[in-house]
């Protein structure tokens, strides 16, 4: 774990999930705070980042090892301030390395206490910028439900455009391409 991957912004540090992180989260969630060096709410995990997502990430990390770290989950940790200590506020990540067409899909979730503070937008921007540092990535996609106006607003704010119906009934697909950002 000495080779942990980080992405940083003014307010957040994204920490790439390792197999040790995900195993700990599944087996002893209270120990995740120790691995992250951050307070973890009893409300964790949140939103779409649930046990099924953790199991998916664990299986992919077991198959791919250290080479795929950073292509799955990232923990979003805010720095300490007068309001709270260093704290896990959400998660984001990719559903795997880019496919043959150069597409990666992202997902993200923020704990209710930390919503409406711009953290989701910050997570999405960081993930998109990071994805486009890889030459093979030409498009980042995301899916959300038609009813999730907050998520739609985040995606639009971060340079995505609506690209039709999603895979599941009632969902929408959003895309962001390297050329549209330039």
Image (tube, grey):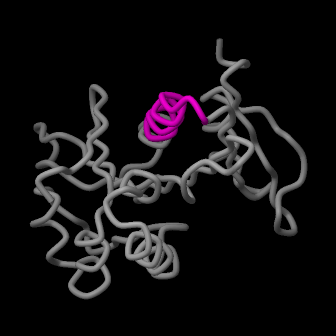
Position in image of residue 88 (x %, y %): 26, 55
125 is within the stretch colored magenta: yes
Q: In the image, 90: left or right of 13?
A: right
- Nearest the camera: 177 or 162? 177
Secondary structure predominantly adopted by residues drawn in magenta:
helix
**Which quadrant: the N terminus?**
bottom left
Residue at image coords 32%, 83%: 26
Q: In the image, 162: left or right of 55?
A: right
Position in image of residue 149 (x %, y %): 71, 47
Where residue 43 sits, quadrant-wise, is bottom left
**Which quadrant: the C terminus?**
top right
- Nearest the camera: 153 or 139? 139
In the orientation shown, which residue stands out farthest toward the bottom? Answer: 27
Q: Which residues are magenta?
A: 122-136
Residue at image coords 16%, 43%: 83
Where residue 174 sits, quadrant-wise, is top right
Position in image of residue 124 (x %, y %): 51, 39
Residue at image coords 42%, 40%: 119
Q: Is residue 135 above or below residue 181?
A: below
Q: Is residue 87 above or below residue 119?
A: below
Q: Is residue 148 above or below residue 35?
A: above
In the orientation shown, which residue stands out farthest toward the top? Answer: 182
- Nearest the camera: 117 or 26? 26
Residue at image coords 26%, 74%: 42
Position in image of residue 127 (x %, y %): 48, 39
Numbered marks: total:
0
171 is within the stretch colored magenta: no
Q: Is residue 19 above or below residue 127?
A: below
């Amino acid at each position: 774990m000495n080779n942990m991957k980080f992405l940083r912004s003014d307010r957040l540090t994204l920490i790439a999930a390792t197999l040790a992180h995900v195993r700990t989260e599944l087996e002893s969630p209270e120990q995740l705070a120790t691995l992250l060096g951050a307070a973890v709410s009893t409300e964790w995990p949140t939103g779409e980042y649930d046990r099924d997502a953790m199991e998916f990430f664990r299986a992919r990390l077991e198959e791919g090892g250290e080479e795929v770290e950073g292509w799955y989950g990232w923990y979003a940790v805010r720095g300490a301030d007068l309001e709270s200590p260093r704290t896990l506020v959400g998660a984001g990540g990719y559903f795997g390395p880019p496919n043959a067409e150069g597409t990666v899909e992202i997902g993200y979730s923020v704990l209710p206490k930390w919503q409406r503070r711009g953290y989701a937008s910050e997570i999405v921007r960081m993930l998109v910028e990071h994805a486009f540092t890889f030459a093979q990535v030409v498009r980042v996609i995301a899916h959300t439900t038609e009813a999730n106006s907050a998520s739609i607003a985040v995606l639009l704010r971060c340079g995505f455009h609506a690209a039709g119906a999603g895979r599941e009934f009632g969902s929408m697909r959003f895309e962001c391409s390297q050329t549209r950002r330039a």
